[in-house]
Amino acid sequence: MGKILIPTSSPEDWKKFLAEPDKHWKRGYSARAIANCWQSANGLPSNVKAVLTKTAALEQIKTLFAIPEHQVPLPGGSRPSQNDVWVLARTPSDLVSIAVEGKVSEPFGPTIAEWNPQSSPGKERRLRFLCAELGLAYPPPNDIRYQLLHRTASAIIEAKRFHAKHAIMLVHSFSRTDEWFSDYSRFLAEFNITAAVDEIVSSGEVSDIVLYFAWARGEKQYLDE
């Protein structure tokens, strides 16, 4: 990704950054719902902010900038972690890195077993790197979702790059039934955390960065736009 960023003026501007625009830019899908919601908010959507500010350290959080489809390079291959949105925010005293994963009905992708880290040296190297970044034992359990692992790591990687004190992996779900919440909950169990919908929880410090996880329900209106 280049270092020159071009501002968006409408949700349609987000489409060109998708890996497969024709496949993912559809009404009722997360890419379009996220674009409409975040572009309309011009910062943190109200429902997201309501969840994040439940923790005292983030009560006065404000967006500095947000980047659609932000790519975070990872070792062990050419494919980066592509965040639906990445946000650099601030509190009165610290910076905050937020990696956003949008969801409607789409799953979190393959489990570790399905992704098969033994299939190539690059995959094994990447998985070892991700576990080290997150302070998790290697190898991780086969039933957790690989996407949640690298999305969380991307929040920490960018926090380090910008010298942010806080990192948040945020699932912004527009599902009316909280689909795939069980996978999110299973992942948080690796950090000895109990997950809840519309809540933010912390695993404490990882590499001197306070790591948070949040699941925020999106508003139905953005599914229809």
Image (cartoon, grey):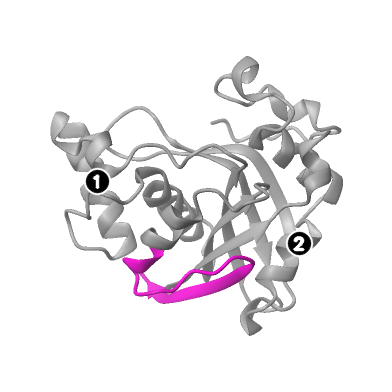
Q: Name the residue under label 1.
A: 127
- In the image, 193 versus 179, the foreground residue is 179
Q: Which amino acid does label 1 sit on?
A: Leu
Of all residues, the one furthest to the front in this rendering is 177
The C terminus sits in image quarter: top right
Is 101 displayed left or right of 76 in the figure?
right
Task: Report the span colored magenta.
Answer: 188-207
- In the image, 88 versus 100, the foreground residue is 100
In the rendered image of this protein, does residue 102 appear above or below residue 31?
A: below
Q: Name the residue under label 2.
A: 47
Q: What element carries label 2?
A: helix
- In the image, 111 versus 156, the foreground residue is 111
Residue 21 percent location from the top left of the image: 63, 19
Q: Residue at x 71, y 33 (%)?
A: 28
Q: What element carries label 1?
A: helix
Upstream in sequence: badge 1 or badge 2: 2
Is 151 displayed left or right of 69 in the figure?
left
In the rendered image of this protein, does residue 26 appear above or below residue 67?
A: above
